[in-house]
Image: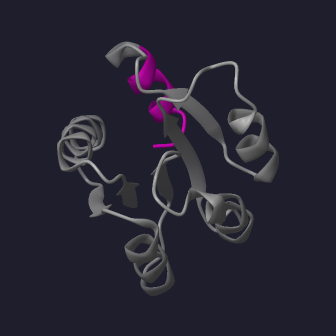
Amino acid sequence: MKILVVDDHEIFRYGLKLVLESMCPNATVLEAENLDCAVNMIAAQDMRLIIFNANLTGADRLEALIRFIIKDSKVVIFSCYDKKQELPGTLLSAGASAFIFKDSSLLEIKELLSEFL
């Protein structure tokens, strides 16, 4: 199983990769630092799960990208946006499987991710 973590902060990608590998040792966890890299990786490989940071540069393209990739992959969105903003609903309506805030506990994050592994 291949998982792609897309975030512009290397430390976040690294930490999430460690969590995912501990939960699913047979998974291959790949990283992309921006949407352009992510698009290239998605085009070249089948991904079972793609985890996006909603705050990436170019995130205005994220809704269209989600609509395109949900045919083949599950999509989870991480965000530090204010929980009252409209973005979670917009991306979930586009087909994202889940939306979780970066201030969630590790237990909450693991429980959510386990639904897709």
**Residue 112, magenta (yes or no):** yes
Image quarter for residue 107? top left
Q: Is residue 4 above or below residue 110?
A: below
Q: Is residue 95 above or below residue 24?
A: below
Q: Residue furthest right?
A: 93
**Quadrant in which the C terminus appears:** top left
The span picked out in magenta is 108-117
Across and down, in percent, residue 103 comes to: 40, 18
Which residue does the image show at 36% across and 52% down from the upper left?
A: 7
Which residue does the image show at 28% across and 63% down from the upper left?
A: 30
**Residue 45, magenta (yes or no):** no
Drawn side of residue 62 relative to residue 1, left or right = right
Which residue does the image show at 38% across and 75% down from the upper left?
A: 37
Q: Residue furthest bottom?
A: 44
Q: How many circles with numbers are drawn on the protein?
A: 0
Q: Is residue 1 visible?
A: no
Q: Is residue 62 above or below residue 20?
A: below
Q: Main secondary structure of the magenta part?
A: helix
**Quadrant in which the N terminus appears:** bottom left
Instruction: Pick the residue in front: 4 or 57.
Output: 57
Across and down, in percent, residue 14 comes to: 18, 45
Across and down, in percent, residue 49 comes to: 49, 55
Drawn side of residue 117 relative to residue 24, left or right = right
Q: Is residue 18 visible?
A: yes
Drawn side of residue 109 relative to residue 66, left or right = left
